Image (cartoon, helix red, strand yellow):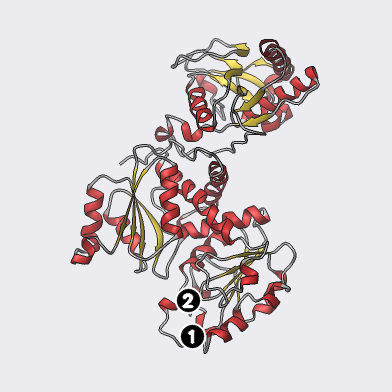
Amino acid sequence: MKHLLSVADLSREEILSVLDTAVSMHEVQHRDVKKLPTLRGRTIINFFFEDSTRTRSSFEIAGKWLSADTINLTGKGTSVSKGESLRDTVLTIDAMGVDMMIVRHPASGAPMQIADWVGCSVVNAGDGTHEHPSQALLDAYSMRRALGDLEGRHVVIVGDLTHSRVLRSNLLCLQRLGAQVTLVAPPTLMPSGIDTWSGTDGFATSYDLDAVLPTADAVMMLRVQRERMSGGYFPTAKEYAVTYGLTKRRLGLLQDHAVICHPGPMNRGLEISADAADAARSLVLDQVSAGVAVRMSILYHLLAGEGSDQ
Amino acid sequence: MSAAQHAGPGRLVLSSDDINRAVRRIAHEILEANKGPEGLLLLGIPTRGAHLARRLGEALRQVEGTEVPVGSLDVTMYRDDLRSQPTRAVEPTDIPGDGVDGKVVVLVDDVLYSGRTVRSALDALADLGRPRAVRLAVLVDRGHRELPIRADYVGKNLPTSHSERVMVRLAEHDGVDAEGVRIAGPADRQGEGE
C-alpha cells in the first residue's frame, strides 16, 4: 500500500490487517507514555481544505504518537487563497520532502488527482461526496469490537445518503468484511442510480426504518448535511426526525445486542435523539477513540514497511 | 529416517519432550536466581515467545504453587528493520496487573540470533516503565550476535551457520504434530520461522 484513496483499493486481507494492528495501537492509547518510535524522521502534512475536528486532530495525534513530524495546513491562510492552483500548492509541499500528505478536499476525486502529481504517499481524509476511507475503517473497527466478526451481521445505514462520503466507503468496507447492509433514506436523499454502484452488489435499500431495525446488529446514523443542501430534500426538520431519526421509540425496536454508530458531528434531535446518542449501546465516543488507533495503523501500513522510501 | 522427520523439513534437534524439559529447567533456574517467584513478570515476544512464556508460567506454578504473571510484549513498532521488509502484522501487547515498574521482567523468545529483537524489546519495555531488572530466556541460542546481548537462560545452544534456518514449531501455534525445533539447510527452505 502506498496511498489510501478509496476502500475499493483495499482487499479484505488488507482491511483486516489494518483493523488487527489497530487493536495493538489502541493499547498504546492507555499507556502513560503514548509514544512509539516507528515513524521517527518521517514528515506528514495534514492538508485540509475543509473544516474538520476529529479527522484532522486524530490524524495529527496518530502521527505524533508514532513519532512522525506532523504539520497542519488549511486552505485558508496558504497560497491557495492567493490564487495558487492546487497542483502548484501540492507540488511545492512535495518538493519540501514530506513523506505523506493527508488531504481533505471539497471536490470529489481531488486526493486521487494529487496522488498522480506527487511522489509522497497520499491519504484521502474525505473528498467531496465520494469517500472517507479512514472513517469506514474506524467504524468497522468499533463494530468489530462490539459485535465480533462482522461476517453475516446486519448493518443498517440511515440518513443523508446522497451527500455522504462516509456511506460509500462504509458500504465497500462492510461488504468486504461480509456484512449484510441495508440503506435507509427518504427517497429524496437516496442516491440516484445507487443500485448500479460498482463493486457493491448485494445490499438492500428501504424507505421504512421501522421495518429494518428489528433485525439490525448495528445502526449507523449519518448526519444530515445542511451545508451541502440547497433545501427541498424534506419538508421540515421535525418531519425528518419523526420519520428517519433514531428516536426513543425506535430504540425499543432494536435487538438487545444491537449497537448505534454515528460518524459525527451529530445533529442531536434531528437524525439522532439524545436518548440514542447517550445510550449505553451507543459507540459514538468509542468511534472517536478508535479513530486514533485506526489512523495509527493506517500510517504504519503506509509508511513503515518496505518500499515506503521514495 | 527418524519418525519425527515427517513433520517438516530439516533435522530435528529438539523434540516436544526436549522442549518441555528445557522449559522446566529454565523455570528452576529462574527461581534459583531470583530466590523465589516474588516480583517476577514473564513477557513473551509474539508469536511463539508468548506461547513459551505461558508454558514457563505454568512450569513455575507447578514448582512453586503460586501464579507468576505472564504477558506478551510486541516489539514490531520498535524494530530497526521495518523499512527493509514488507509490513509486518502487529501482535497484541498485554501487560498484566500493575505494569512493569519494580518487577523482575523475564523476556521470553524462541530463538536468539542477531539480538535485534531483544534490543527492540528493551526499548519497548523502557516506554512501559522501569523494571527492577530485565532477564532474557530463550529456547534456542543459535549464535551470530550483532549486538552486545546475551541470554540469561538458554534451552539449547545450537551452533549454526548463517545459511541454515532454525525452525521452532509449538503445539499452540503450529499443531501438536509439528512441535519441535529443526535445523534446515538453505536447500529446504519453506515456511521457516525466525
Few, some or many C-alpha atoms within 10 Å of disc 1 (few <14, some 14-19, many ≥20)? Answer: few
The answer to whether the residue labelled 1 contacts the one labelled 2, judged by CB atoms less than 8 Å apart, is yes
Query: Residue A198: x, y in percent?
Result: 48, 68
Which numbered disc covers residue A162? 2
Q: Which chain carries label 2?
A: A
Q: In which quarter of the image is the C terminus of chain A?
A: top left
Q: What's the amino acid at mark 2?
A: Thr
Q: Which amino acid does label 1 sit on?
A: Tyr
1 and 2 marks on the same chain: yes
Q: Going 54% across and 14% down the picture, which residue do you hit?
A: B142
Mark 2, Cα crowd under 10 Å, few <14 / some 14-19 / many 20+, is: many
Instruction: Judge whether residue A176 can be spotted in this image.
Output: no
Residue at image location 53% in from the left, 28% down from the top:
B125
User: Where residue B159 is drawn, which disc sits there?
Assistant: none
Q: Give the SS element for disc 2.
A: loop
Residue extending farthest to the front is B102
Which is more N-terminal, label 2 or label 1? 2
The local secondary structure at tag 1 comes to loop
For label 1, the residue is: A233
Find residue B18 and report its horizontal and vertical position in percent.
Answer: 71, 15
The answer to which image quadrant residue A186 occupies is bottom right
Image location of residue A41, percent across then percent down = 34, 37
Q: Quadrant of residue A84?
A: bottom left
Instruction: Please tell me whether residue B25 is drawn above or below residue A89 in the rendered image.
Output: above
Which dot, 1 or 2, sits closer to the camera?
1
Q: Mark 1 lies on which chain?
A: A
Q: Position of residue A5 (x, y in %)?
A: 40, 57
A191 lies above or below A108? below
